[in-house]
Amino acid sequence: MASNFVQPGDVLELTAPVGGVVAGKGYLIGSIFVVAQDTKSAGETFRGARKGVFDLAKTNAVAFTEGAKVSFDTATLATLAPAGGKVPVGSAVKAAAGGDATVRVALDGIATAAA
């Protein structure tokens, strides 16, 4: 193994933003989209998963088909269909109807920015 290896990158230790983080919710930390694994106050270190499949809150009335691209709204901390100013985060691995509260998302695990 390379002598400069630090850790696997699926879960990162990051600093909670203003307002803190709640376990199970998505957050954009700079250009890294993660799902918080801990509930922490602003400024505390938390673990954020950048890869994996998660059930994430979604915007009401938005439906997803299996395989559809999923974006994230940093204002509402909810997923929605791709749109200008929204952050692409992954793909739906299960269809979600408009009335569903969540969508199952496979995270892309790449640094991202608003479209």
Image (cartoon, rainbow, N blue to C red):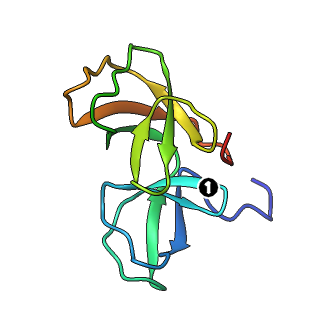
* Residue 73 percent coordinates (x, y): 48, 48
* Residue 81 percent coordinates (x, y): 48, 29
Front-most of residues 5 and 107: 107
Specify the amino acid type for callout 1: Ile
SS type, badge 1 = strand
Which residue is drawn at the image coordinates 52% and 49% (left, top)? Answer: 50
Q: Alpha-carbon neighbours of circle 1 within 10 Å: few (<14), some, or many (≥20)?
A: some
| Rendered position, 56 above or below 83 | below
Count of marks placed on residues: 1
Furthest toward the bottom, the residue is 43
Front-most of residues 99 and 96: 99
Horizontal relation, residue 27 to residue 101: left or right: right
Q: Which residue is mark 1?
A: 32
Which residue is drawn at the image coordinates 37% and 70% (left, top)? Answer: 21
Q: Quadrant of the C terminus?
A: top right
Which residue is drawn at the image coordinates 39% and 76% (left, top)? Answer: 20
Front-most of residues 50 and 73: 73
Q: Quadrant of residue 53?
A: top left
Horizontal relation, residue 2 to residue 23: left or right: right
Q: Quadrant of residue 104?
A: top left
Which residue is drawn at the image coordinates 40% and 77% (left, top)? Answer: 19
Horizontal relation, residue 105 to residue 2: left or right: left
Furthest toward the right, the residue is 3
* Residue 54 percent coordinates (x, y): 35, 39
